[in-house]
Amino acid sequence: MRFVAASGFSALLLGSISSPADAWINAVQMTQDEATYRIAAVHAAMHLEQYWFADLMIPEGKFGRIGYIEITDRPHRDDDKLDLTLLDAQQVIEMRWGEPDEDDAADLETYFRRRLEDGKSPRLVAWLAEASALSGDADNAVALLRDLEQHDLMPDAHAYAMLAEHTSGAEQLRAAAKCRVRALVKKICPVVPGTQTV
């Protein structure tokens, strides 16, 4: 386990970062352009499966991983989208690169369930499915992913990879094939009989 981004402290932050009045909680100061660059770099690295670099690009606050971005050229912003974007990224990095144990996986699952209370999005649902599978609840993971696929809402190759890993037969073949179509880095897709490996 390289780090535990989805600890109880991160869960606490979810409830606290929504108010700029709580900027003292592990705040990092940067301009709007700097914040936008950081987020773009994190997303690009994750898209290329370079989680070590994505991790490197997440700002460090005085007390560790970032909790709140204090935008110096927009001091009175009234949204927490920037904070949640980076906080979400930390959880995904932990899932895919941090080698989480069972307790960490349960924390990750709790985190994404909590995030979904703020509004459902296919990406958050897929991340919850991934966390559920890690915590041992493959049935829930498959149910979530099947619902996404049924509504043509699968957000990325990882969602198809997870579906392929936990299904069989024609469904597994279809998911593995779609994973290879969507993935920039093909090694994330499970190799199953009947799918191409090149």
Image (cartoon, rainbow, N blue to C red):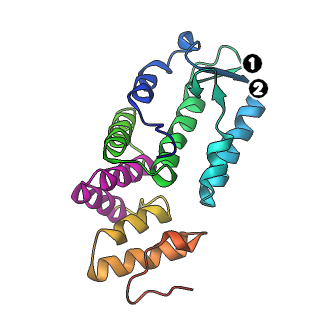
Q: Quadrant of residue 85?
A: top right
Residue in view at x 46 percent, y 18 percent: 16
Residue reaching furthest to the front = 1
**Image position, residue 155 (x, y; %):** 47, 58
Instruction: Give the side of residue 3 with respect to residue 167, left or right.
Output: right
At which x and y percent is residue 56?
A: 67, 43
46 and 1: which one is in front?
A: 1
Q: The disc labelled 2 sits on which kind of residue? A: Thr
Q: Main secondary structure of the magenta part?
A: helix
At 43% across and 80% down in the image, what residue appears? 191
Residue 117 versus residue 104 in the image, above or below: above
Q: What segment is highlighted magenta in the picture? A: 122-150
Residue 141 falls within the magenta-colored stretch: yes
Residue at left offset 41%, top offset 48%: 100
Q: CA distance from mark 1 to mark 2?
A: 5 Å
Callout 2: SS: loop
Query: Where residue 146 sits in the image (x, y, percent)?
Result: 30, 63
* 26 to 144, vertically: above or below: above
**Mark 1 vs 2, N-terminal side:** 2
Q: Amino acid at mark 1?
A: Thr
Please say whether residue 93 is one of the residues in the magenta stretch: no
User: On the image, numbered disc 1 is attached to which residue?
Assistant: 72
The total of numbered circles placed on residues is 2
Residue 114, percent from left and from top: 35, 34
Q: Which residue is mark 2?
A: 31
Q: Are marks 1 and 2 in contact (CB under 8 Å)?
A: yes
